[in-house]
Amino acid sequence: MKHKIAGLLSACTMLTLGAGSALADYDLRILHTNDVHDRVESVTKYNNTCSVEDDADGKCFGGYARLATAIRDAKAQGGNVLALDGGDQFQGSLYYSTYRGQLTAQLMTMAGYDAMTIGNHEFDDGPEVLEAFIKASTVPVLSANVHPTAASSLDGEIKPDIIVELGGEKIGLIGITTEETPDISSPGDQVEITDSEMALRYSVARLRLKGVNKIIVMSHSGSYKDFELAKTVSGIDVIVGGHDNQLFSNTNEKANYPYPVVETAPDGKPVLVVQAYAYSRYLGELNVTFDDDGVATAWSGEPIALDASIKPAQDVLDVIALSSGKVDAVRNVDVGSFTTPADGSRETCRHMECSMGSLVADAMLWKAGDGYQIAIQNGGGVRASIDEGTVTMGEVLTVLPFQNALATFNLSGKDVVASLEHGVSKVDEDKGQFPQVAGLKFDLDLSKPVGSRVSNVMVAEGDSYAPIDMNKTYGVVSNDFMRNGGDGYALFRDNATNVYDFGPNLEQAVADYIGMKSPMTPMAGDRIILK
């Protein structure tokens, strides 16, 4: 309710102050994206790559060619315009798997971005890939709390903040990266991710000493963290967020928050927090008026839906077309078919059993073979849904873009239950650790305290289920990211025995399973029973 009231207050502020700006006022238009996840081409409602036919019929959204048109049109209208990104440009399509960010660097320049921050997925293939991206990019890549050591290839490549001059005024831009990055990505031991609040305080102070009184933070930290930072760090005017893929809007009934959310800093000044969902489907547009002291006095805006009404930029389409050959060779291969859609949405797979998650877990257990009774896949590793009909390898790779290998190991029943408890411990924070399972089922009561939410854990034995034996050792299959402690699964890392982290790639196992079972009907509902 607080944030809804804040949205109404922002509208009232506009009615009071929007009639005309004083001579000393400064108007700034902030365009922003976040969590694009290399959706280079337009996407369906399931965030998979859209077909040429559906795109021609106006059924598709986003893509870099539409992003470029929207940003270019806004800048062509004149005034003070910045185009910013809240991180996670990497990872999510075959274009990333093929070009490792090099195409993304080119497209961001063509679209007209002015700066971006580093998201956790920018580290998915290690610091070297991020280094190559930064060197290829003309767009500043910022993060105040990412600190490479002198031995890192990233040493000297990342700026904490910059100053841009626009319309005769200095604008300070700061980037920050989620502190969870070491647990959910691969920055390595030569890159330290420090406390974001302290990093922000240093950058704000540095910019203030240089005469900057208008500061924008690009924060890949999650909306929950952004609200906290807005209320605890003075000197920030706008936070362009990312990481939890939230839609801020005053008109869309599915919005998570109003646009913008207005918080109050310790110095009493308003801080405007925005985010624009994900996958290139929206371009956020925040218009802010600042007084001579750099205080935001009026604001308005709404994410722009990049639908069929936005004509794609032809030069960007041409570059994508030249790059698509290597991608087409993989993604156009048919692997099977579904009789119903498979739900792999973030909203489901991070909160409860989802049909795509169950399918992935089933495929893992099938591929592991004899000697393995339990499969556990992190819900955050499931990145998209697939519609009914023919299933292509490209769609499977959009669901599972991380190129994880199957990992097999032995674990006690006690540690399996404790791992399930860990998996469901942060549902309210939308964390990716939520367990999608096969070979077992359990009851889940989210009203119970953390550590006591899981009960009645049953393991499949033939055609029936038996209560899990806390002292028994079970054969478990997961992915190599989780087995090595990713998403906080420390017991997989520390207590597992008979470990093998180098099985077949997860996406290939799932493709093979779909092919074997086709036509198949993805289902969910009987493994994780919500109480």
Image (spheres, helix red, strand yellow):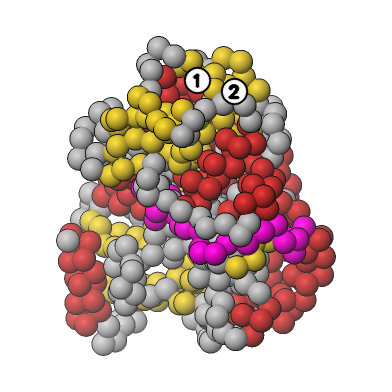
- On the image, the x and y values in percent for residue 281 come to 51, 70
Task: Describe residue 80's horizontal placement relative to residue 505 as left or right.
Answer: left
SS at circle 2: loop
Residue 371, disc: 2
Residue 474, disc: 1
Residue 98, disc: none
- On the image, the x and y values in percent for residue 304 come to 45, 77
Query: In front here: 97 or 295?
Result: 97
In this picture, which residue range is highlighted in magenta? Answer: 330-351
**Is residue 180 rendered magenta in the image?**
no
Determine which quarter of the picture holds residue 17: bottom left
- Seen at 30% across and 63% down, the residue is 257
Examine the rendered structure and indicate whether residue 530 appears above or below residue 390: above
Query: In front here: 354 or 10?
Result: 354
Comparing marks 1 and 2, which lies closer to the viewer?
2
SS at circle 1: strand
Q: Residues within 10 Å of mark 2 (few under 14, many from 20)?
A: few
Query: In front here: 278 or 292?
Result: 278
**Is residue 344 rendered magenta in the image?**
yes
Visible residue check, residue 196: no
